[in-house]
Every structure is written in C-alpha cells, then in structure tokens.
Image (tube, grey):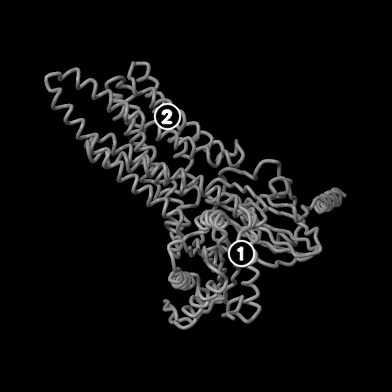
Amino acid sequence: MTQFLALLLMVLSACQVHADNLKLYDIQTRVNLDSSVLYIEDANASLDIGEVLQQALPWQQGGPKSFNKSYNQSAWWLRLDIDNAQDKPQRRLIELSYAVLDHVDVYIVAGGQVLASHMLGDKQPFYERVFDHRFFVIPVEWQPSQSLQIYLRVKSSSAVQAPLTLWEEKAFYGFDTTRTIMNGIFFGIMLVIAAYNLLIFCVLGERTYLLYVGYVICMPLFLASLGGYSFQYMWPTFTDWNDESILFFLSGVVVFGVAFTRSFLVVQRYSPGLDRLLVIALAGGIVLAATTFMLPYYVNIKALIAWATFACILALLSGVFCWYSQQKVAQYYTIAWVSMLSGGVILALNKAGVLPANLFTEYATHIGSALEVVLLSFALAERINEERRLRFEAQEEALTGIRQANEELEYRVQERTKELEAMTCKLRELSNTDQLTGLHNRRFFDSQIKMEWLRACRYQHPISIIAIDIDHFKSVNDRYGHMVGDECLREIARRVGLGVRWPTDVAARYGGEEFVMLLPETTREDAVIVAERVRKSVEVAHIDTRAGELSLTISAGIYCVTPENDNFSGIDILLEKADECLYRAKAMGRNCIFPVPD
C-alpha cells in the first residue's frame, strides 16, 4: 500500500510538471530557465539517459536562483520541459553560462525518444562543441506544436553551477557582444597598465614594479581561464591544463600580490610580525602553485580559495596598519585592496553556492580588479612623487642634477606613453578585425555603414551592398573538418578583400561563411561588376588546403539605394534587400549573382 501511494504521488507530480511546461512564443527573446529546472542527484554517477527515461525518478523543482550545488562528486541530471506554442517551427539557443564544468551531456528528447545528443564540457576539446562559444550553448529546434524535454547531465570537479537561459538567436548575439565588450575593456585596462608599469620598471629598475606587473598579468589570466576565454582562444585542446591554469594563475595572484604588498608598503619596517605572516602566505602560495599539477582540482581549489582569502585579508590588514602608521601611499593601497577583496569575496560566495550566478556576481571580480589596479597605479605614482620630494629635501645641493634627472625621466615616460598610445591604436584596430580572416568584422562594418549612409543622404549619392555566401560550405566542414574550413574561409576572404576598389569600400566578414561588401557612391551596375569579379576569382582558382585542392564557389546578392533621409532604419532595409537578393542567387542554382548582369 505504501509503495502504491508513493508511485501515485510520483505520477501526480510528473503530471503537474507537464502541466507547467514552458511555452515558446515569438515575442520571447530571453527566458531565464532557472525556475523551470527539474533536477535529481546521481550520487554514484551511474545513471544513463536510457535509465533516466525509463525509470520514475523523484525529480525536484528548481528555485528562482540558478542551479548551484557547489563542490561535490555527484552527477546531476537537469530536465527542461518546453512546448512550442506556435503552429510553425521554432529555433532557440539554450545557454549554460558557466564555463568550467568538466562534463555536460545534453539529450534532446521527444515522445521518449532521443532526437539528438551532445557531449560538452571542458574535458572535451573546444572544437568539438556544437556551438563556437566560451559557454555551453545548445541550438534546439521545435516542430509546430512539438513538446521537447532537454536533459543535461552535469558532473564536475569544479563548483557545480548551471545558470540556464533560453535565447532567441539575434538577442543572444546582441547580449553576447555587450558581454564581450565589457570583458574586452577589462582585459584592455589590465594590459595597458601592465605594459605601462613594465616600462617604468625598465626605466627605474625597481623590483616593486615588476612584482606589480606579475600580479596584473596573473589576475586577468585567472579570470580569463575561469570565464572560458582562455580555453576558447589560447589552449582549446589542452583540457587538463585548462583546469590547472585556474589554480596556477590564482596561485600567481596570491604570490605576486603578497610579494608586492611587502615590497610596496615596506611592511618589515612598520610591523615585523605582519611581515612574517606575509612571508608565510607567500610560501603557501608557492606550495599551492606547485600542487596544482599533483592534487585533484576539487581538493586544491578549496585549499586555494581559503588561502587566497587569508592572503587578501592579511594584505588588507597590512595596508590598514601602514595607513595608521602615517604612510601616505598606504591609503591608496588600502582602498584599492578593499575593491579587489570585495570582488573576490563575492566570487568565493558564488562558488560556494551562497550567492546566485548572475551578471553582477560574474563581473564583480572584474570590476573590483580593474578598480584595484587603477588605484594601485595612482599609489605607485604617489610613491614616486613622495620619494621625489624626500630626495629634494635631503639633497638640496644636488638640486640641479636631480631636476635634470626628473626631466629625463618625464621625457622617457612621454616616449613610453606614445608607444602605449600606438599600442592602444593597434588594439583598436584588432577589435575591428575578424581574427580568422583578417577582414573587418561586423562591429566595424556596422559603424562604417552608418557613416556612409549619412554621407550618401547628404550628397544624394547611391550606396550599394553586396551580400556574399560560400556555396555548400557546411559540407566542407562536415567532410574535411573545421581546420580545412578555416583555411577556405581565409582564402576566400582574401579574394573578397581584393575586390575592394577604393579606400572607402569596406569588405567584412558578417558571420560564419557570410561576407559583405559596402560600396559607397556606387551604382547597381558598378556593384554588379565588382560582385562578378569576386565571384570569378573564387570560381577559377582552386584553394590549397591540408586536405588538398578544393573547388568552391560563392553566391552574391546586390542591392543599391540612394538614401532619402538620415533615418538609420533604412540601413536594416538595405541589408535585408541584399540578403533577399543573395537567396535569389542561391535559388538560381548558386555560383551566380543577383541582380544578374545585363
């Protein structure tokens, strides 16, 4: 009788879950899935998808916060029931925005049958991901009025977190661009400050600046590893090192941060006891860096987080004590360390499951670290000024020589600043360039077309768009692999770039295997000539790849307009018309352009 009641409750619970299935509508661009998650714990990590589908399991309802079980050795099954409420197909992206999970197995089920499965996680080489992104992104398609169940099996030696979001594709790309820009700003700030202080070290030869540079370099590398950027761009096939890098660079933050604190504040002069504790923290950081390659991740990360917290608090106490002891630069140092420590505490609480995973907890460490390094740069500058004043007071007889030395130093700093400005210009150029093909990227294209649109409107000149797509490119990736596909993209991009006639023309990679050419002051007839020249350049010459010579073709759509007003909404229409022409060219049999030459 008891077993019958338990089974009845389980069936009723399942019926209730089905009644509350998430519905898809066209107006939805972003849906937080945390409250829609059902989960079970597989403590022995023994269940497979067949057993999950066949057995009546005690699924538990997720709460309003992101799924977070901190550090444990269990496997966790997550389930999402999503219905297509429309009488037409729907396509969405499911984003699991936590980059350091070891294993994420995804199963898409309809009517008890597995339609598709994906083996993800950072224990798989990055190129095996179904979607090229630092997070785990799964494209899902619903047929009209179809119900799908998405099962995720998550197991990791890191904190088990699964913040899930359902995206409409265009909205996802827009939001992801914002996230990328935020991270780019953070990494740019860290790079510029590291380079600046390295140059000062080269000029002054003072060890404090070199320790500071080590700290500034380790911090963004740690956050890049934690956020998945390192795995995506730096070591996409080194799965073991991907875990170890988080530990190694966090150990580097501890080692260089403590060493910088001792040197910058001259702690031994003000408090020998605090200095001995700092030496212990420094030694512990070195030991933990060495054990990165010896101990399991889940053991080392717990010890390292605790030790890093101890080191941060100790460094903060050192700053407060030196500030109390009337050391002027210590006030800058203390405020800077409070900023960083706040972000670190938020990160630690998030990994421990106390705080939810969201945009604030994700970027709290970035913001705190950026504020810290900027404030510490002010502290270093203040230290230079303080030492300069003391030197003037102690060596009045050498005032002339000191002034000359300072003028020389300022000159060198100006020279180095010019170099940094050139470096910043180079970074700006890189941010406008597609890293794979070398063409301009979509970000640059979007800014240029707005500028040319206004100019064309002012002078009533025509402006033409050529939308280009590689024919049957998916079959190249499927047959030869993405490395060969990348070689083909680079070569075709080169030929597209050669089609540019004037400095005002823009050739850009628009996404995937799609390219676009912006031709200001160009009529439709002239644009047809350009497009046909690019098409022939691709058709007549084979592409040399590691898989041998490949013959590819392109299709192109052309649209020309003379703007009547400066409303940017006309740009969207121009791009849509060019895209429609591209599809017309494909419908004509590919390897052609539309409009066709007269």
Q: Residue at x 61, y 64 (%)?
A: 561
Q: Quadrant of residue 278?
A: top left
Q: In this picture, is 87 found above or below 165?
A: below
Q: Is residue 125 left or right of residue 584?
A: left
Q: How many marks?
A: 2
State the residue at coordinates (47%, 38%).
305
Circle 1 Cα neighbour tier, 10 Å, few/some/many (<14 / 14–19 / ≥20):
many
Q: Is residue 44 visible?
A: no
- In the image shown, does 366 or 403 lie closer to the viewer? 403
> Residue placed at 17% from the left, 18% from the top?
394
For label 1, the residue is: 561
The residue lying furthest to the front in this view is 459
The Cα–Cα distance between marks 2 and 1, rounded to whole angstroms, is: 54 Å
Image: 151 above or below 327: below
Q: Position of residue 91 (x, y in %)?
A: 70, 61
Tell me what residue is drawn at x 38 percent, y 49 percent.
425
Q: Residues within 10 Å of mark 2 (few under 14, many from 20)?
A: many
* Front one among 10 and 214: 214
Q: Amino acid at mark 1?
A: Val
Q: Quadrant of the C terminus?
A: bottom right
- Disc 2 on helix, strand or loop? helix
Indicate the position of residue 190 as horizontal and vertical percent values.
40, 42
Question: For numbered disc 1, what is the local secondary structure?
Answer: strand
